[in-house]
Each structure stands twice: as C-alpha cells, then as structure tokens.
Image (cartoon, helix red, strand yellow):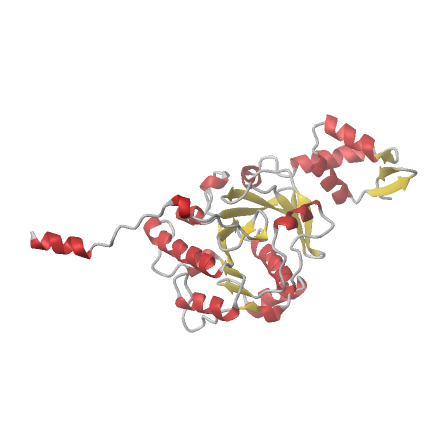
C-alpha cells in the first residue's frame, strides 16, 4: 500500500484550463491566407517544380520590407490582411543547394538584401529540427521567417519519416519555436512517388507532418506549359483556403507572378485538365479577335456564356499579350501585330 501511495505522490498534479478564461489571439500573417506568423507552413511538390525559387522570392521581398505580391495584381488585396513589415531577418537552411553557386545568385536575382539572410553553419555537425542551435539562431538574429529546405534533410539520421511516433516530437518542437518567437516557419518538402495524383496521398511521409502544420501549399507545373507553375492551398486551419496562384519560371525572363489560376491541387498533380482551361480561353480569344478589335465588354460576355471564368480569361489575355486600346469611353481588345 505504501508503494502505491508513493507512486501517486510522484504523479503530476491535475491542471484544468477553463475556456471562459482563455483570451482570443489575433493571427498575424506573413502572407494571408497562405503563411501565418507563429505557425508552421509546409510547401511541398515534386523536385524541380520551383518550390525553392518561389520561397526565395518571398524571402527577398521580406528582406526589403516589400509586398510579396505585385501591387498591380488582383491578389494585392490579400496584402490588406498581411502585416506591414520593416525589412526583416530570415534564416534559410538548405541541405541540397550550394550557397555560393545557387542560393545567393537566386537571392540577388530576386533583389534580396543578402545581409538579412542568415545560414547556420552546420559543416561540422548536421543541423536537425531538434537542434538547440535553431532556437539560438532565432534569438540572436530575431528572424521573422525560418525556412528548412527540404524538410527531409533535417529530420536526423535515425528518424523514419513514415513513423508518427518519430515525426510528432519534431513537428511539435518547430511549432513551439514558431509560437514562442512569433516567427513563421516554412518547411519545404518533396512529395512521395505515389502514382495516385490526389494530394492527400502524395504528401510527406507521416500524416503528422500535415497535422502539425497550420497551412499546406502544393507547387506544381502545368503539363502543356512547363514554364507556368501553380501554388495550390490544400490545408488552411486559420483562414479560408486561398485561391490557386500561378507564377512563370523562365530561364530567360526569370520569375514572374501571373495571378489566380483556375485549377485544383488534385488536377495539378494528376495531370487532368492541366492547362486545359487556359488553352480553351486562349483559343476563344484568338477566334473572337481574329477579324479585328472587339469591345472588352462583349469579349467578357461571350466568354462567360462559354463557361470561361473571368480570371482565366485575363490570364489568357496576358499569355497572348493582347493589346487594350481605349476608344471613347470603351476599351477594345486586339491581337498583337
């Protein structure tokens, strides 16, 4: 009996939290509704789809205190719920790309202030998600964004990414760091090789990766137009899911945001309807403008009657470099010469 009583005394005291006394906390956004501060965001996709390039573009804007999305795009409205920032420091860790031959050239190309991008030197000992140096670096640099790219490179040699009991403490650790220091943490990951295109089956190993993240984004390329990549929101715990947004990644012209793109994550990954909607819109414009200029209102009305969404129509217009000319009080569209 004495042994039992002794064990009971060593057990932790019961503590209850009354929800009446819990204060509601406002969510701050690095980019609404895609990347929240104080939380973990996962950006995943197949290798070579532009995940790292896109994140480096975001980093570049943050180091300059600039809006992530262009001010002349329809998506600039998203910036209304995004925190207005002064230039901030960023921690960027890569386990794949060279700092001098790949990362810095991309940052410079994106216009980053490289003095605000920090890297933990792990040449002597590989960095992991449980490493105390991660928290020390956040404290020292006061970083508002931390990126681990790819997540598979920072699990540790003995961790099986498919075992929930091994992944759960790692994800809890980074989630606590994000909350404690009110910084956004982005984990970039390669998707698995499952032939089923559905995003729910092609995520990172254990489901605990996505369970711990408050936002999950998938990046993929359009099948028939490989220079166009799309970002799809597949999980959003803190806000309504954002609409898919496309960017162009071209070896000659570099990176450029395009805008909203009418495609789902599953269609993007499986190849179904990849680029089909934009192709239909482009064919429509070439047909309706073949004989000369047409009033923008008439073009829009005809497109709507054929089931072409407004944003898809404007994306097609931009792709075809269609000219807009104002005659009197009306705008007219015409094919480029």
Residue 108 point in image, percent of width and height? 65, 66
In the image, farthest residue toward the top: 305
> Does residue 3 lie above or below 75 as drawn?
below
Residue 245 point in image, percent of width and height? 63, 45
Q: Nearer the viewer, residue 210 or 7?
A: 7
Question: Quadrant of residue 267 in the image?
Answer: top right
Specify whether residue 202 is in view: yes
> Does residue 89 lie above or below 320 as drawn?
below
Residue under the image location 71 percent in, 33 percent down? 280
Left or right: 277 as drawn, with respect to 232 = right
Residue 134 point in image, percent of width and height? 44, 66
Residue under the image location 36 percent in, 45 percent down? 18
In the image, farthest residue toward the left: 1
Q: Nearer the viewer, residue 227 or 155?
A: 155
Question: Quadrant of residue 56 in the image?
Answer: bottom right
Left or right: 29 as drawn, with respect to 134 = right
> Does residue 205 lie above or below 159 as drawn?
above
Residue under the image location 75 percent in, 44 percent down? 318
Left or right: 326 as drawn, with respect to 147 = right
Residue 195 point in image, percent of width and height? 47, 40
In the image, farthest residue toward the bottom: 124
Q: Nearer the viewer, residue 90 or 144?
A: 144
């Amino acid at each position: 009996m004495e042994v039992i009583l002794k064990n009971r005394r060593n057990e932790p005291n019961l503590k209850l939290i009354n929800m009446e006394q819990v204060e509601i906390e406002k969510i701050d956004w690095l980019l609404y509704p895609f990347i929240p501060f104080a939380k973990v965001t996962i950006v995943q996709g197949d290798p070579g789809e532009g995940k790292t390039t896109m994140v480096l573009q975001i980093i570049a804007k943050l180091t300059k205190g600039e809006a992530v999305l262009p001010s002349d795009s329809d998506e600039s409205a998203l910036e209304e719920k995004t925190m207005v920032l002064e230039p901030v420091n960023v921690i960027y860790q890569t386990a794949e790309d060279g700092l001098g031959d790949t990362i810095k050239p991309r940052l410079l190309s994106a216009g980053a202030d490289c003095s605000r991008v920090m890297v933990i030197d792990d040449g002597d000992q590989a960095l992991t998600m449980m490493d105390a140096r991660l928290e020390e670096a956040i404290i020292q640099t006061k970083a508002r964004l931390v990126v681990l790219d790819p997540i598979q490179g920072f699990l540790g040699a003995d961790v099986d990414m498919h075992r929930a009991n091994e992944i759960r403490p790692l994800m809890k650790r980074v989630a606590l760091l994000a909350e404690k220091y009110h910084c956004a943490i982005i984990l970039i990951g390669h998707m698995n090789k499952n032939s089923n295109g559905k995003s729910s089956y092609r995520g990172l190993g254990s489901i605990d990766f996505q369970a711990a993240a408050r936002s999950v984004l998938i990046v993929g390329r359009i099948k028939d137009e490989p220079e166009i990549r799309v970002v799809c929101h597949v999980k959003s715990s803190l806000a309504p899911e954002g609409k898919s947004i496309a960017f162009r990644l071209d070896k000659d012209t570099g990176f450029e945001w395009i805008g909203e793109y009418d495609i789902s994550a599953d269609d993007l990954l499986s190849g179904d309807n990849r680029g089909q909607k934009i192709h239909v819109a482009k064919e429509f414009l070439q047909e309706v403008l073949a004989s000369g200029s047409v009033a923008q209102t008439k073009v829009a009305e005809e497109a709507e009657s054929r089931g072409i969404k407004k944003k898809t129509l404007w994306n097609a217009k931009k792709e075809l470099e269609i000219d807009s000319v104002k005659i009197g009080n009306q705008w007219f569209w015409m094919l480029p010469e």
